[in-house]
Amino acid sequence: MTPISRSSSGRRSVATLVCGALAAGGLAAAGVATLEPGAASASSHREAPLISGQPQFDNTDVYAFVSPDHPDTTTLVANWIPFEEPAGGPNFFTFAEDAQYDLHIDNNGDAQGDLLFRYTFKTHTKNDKTFLYNTGAVTSLDDPDLNITQTYDIEMIKLRKQKVTYKTKIADDVPVAPSNVGKASMPDYATLRNEAVHKLTNGAKTFAGQADDPFFLDLRVFDLLYGGNLSEVGNDTLKGYNVNSIALQVPTDMIAESKEQPVVGIWSTTQRKNAQGYFSQVSRLGMPLVNEVVNPIKDKDKFNASSPWEDAQFLKNVTNPELPKLIEAIYKIPAPKEPRNDLVDVFLKGVEGLNQPPHVTPSEQLRLNTSIKPAAEPKRLGVLDGDNAGFPNGRRLSDDVLDAALQVVEGELVGAKNDLGDAVDKNDKDFEKAFPYVALPTEGSRGPLAKGTSEGNDVRNQLGDALQPAGAGGMDDTTLIAGSAGAGALGILLIGGALMWWRRMRERAY
């Protein structure tokens, strides 16, 4: 296969950054348009009106790549719950129990799902008489101090023309890695992560739990296209936020049609149980930045409820994208001529000779040629920079999909060479070298320590010792007493504050 290559460039000029910012919006929009099948939340991060109010069901990104350390396997990663604030307790971040989190595989290019991996979750509470997520330091997934836990099952479902031909459970009651409450609560979170990696049959692996959000970009494009003058670029808006991740690594021959036809299409959906007890699809995601920027408001919820074989209804959003026109109007960068058939090829069919299956039915999916070996030195722009193992041939965690999409939307493949981007070129955290590859989540205890404390946590330990009653035998009692003492101290502060406020109010004239 002939790589689509481009020469590397030096530092971007201010004009280029501006174009990049605008183009980023245009590119994202074009990408979204090309993906307009149904109701997707590709790189969604609150991409559609209805799903923005249902974060547990909101799929933010999908990744698919040949595993770099096990090239005979393929890894799928899908994320949910955008903008998880690490300190967002006491009710931290769990998968929904009334949802089906699905990973879909189309292995012959007909826009129909052929294989489905379905994750469903259960929540368990040890002690419902405390508000605490954990009642002490957690050192393992079965630690009695981890008060709120989740487990999940996986079903593998084979389909033909959307009719089930085979169904089996391939995982049962697998533990979920918890939210990273903080260093005091989870002093060695990496151990908890490792315990949550579960081996399945045939060399497959699964993981579910919290992770650092691997998507990196500057989302201030929505502030009048990066401030109206490109003054708002270069900041990773998602830095410091977490997501809930599902990762699945399977032998490639389990999902590919054959060695002669190694291209697979991947997308994810979320189905939510309604009042009648039936499941309905509320989120869909394949290619990044589709429903977020390309689809107009009138189509966003419809897209999230639709399926790839229904994508023809969104075709105009791709062939006549809004974003390049906005960029031209504001930044005077000429928009490529329409209809944008180049976007249809990249986002709906796959690149011919690279990741386009034979007899392909155009639809929004993340398409991966599983026969292409992982790159020894991955390039962030993937195929645009001659690295055929990267985006849009699947999507690796390190791929800079925003810059790549912007450049394509602004005409990179139709002669309008450009170096557009948002000046955010990599994730703020390094990705792991082994499955599940996503970076560890940011802890809720991040930030400066209070005066008089140190990394040794000595003050808090002394507090715990002081609250330990004479002859007390268990950690549970100590932690609950500490919690009660903390609650009492907070109550005293609140009462004192209320009295001061009451005294001031008596002195006011109104």
Image (cartoon, helix red, strand yellow):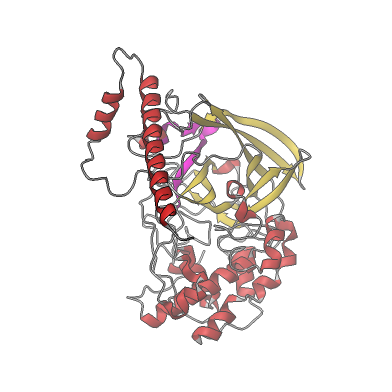
Query: 73 or 457: nearer the eye?
Result: 457
Q: Is residue 285 visible?
A: no
**444 to the left or right of 247:** left
At x 65%, y 41%, the residue is 99
Q: Relative to 477, does residue 71 appear above or below in the rendering?
A: below
**404 to the left or right of 377:** right
Q: Relative to 283, does residue 230 appear above or below in the rendering?
A: below
At x 55%, y 58%, the residue is 43
Query: 144 or 463: nearer the eye?
Result: 463
At x 49%, y 43%, the residue is 72
Please provide percent x and percent y for residue 4: 49, 69
Please provide percent x and percent y for residue 387: 44, 62
Query: 494 or 245: nearer the eye?
Result: 494
Residue 278 in which image quadrant:
top right
At x 52%, y 84%, the residue is 330
**184 to the left or right of 283:** left
Magenta stretch: includes residue 190: no
Please provide percent x and percent y for residue 423: 39, 69
Q: Is residue 349 visible?
A: yes
Q: In the orientation shown, which residue stands out farthest toward the top?
A: 471
Please provide percent x and percent y for residue 11: 32, 75
Magenta stretch: includes residue 212: yes
Label count reads 0
Where does the magenta region start and end?
193-213
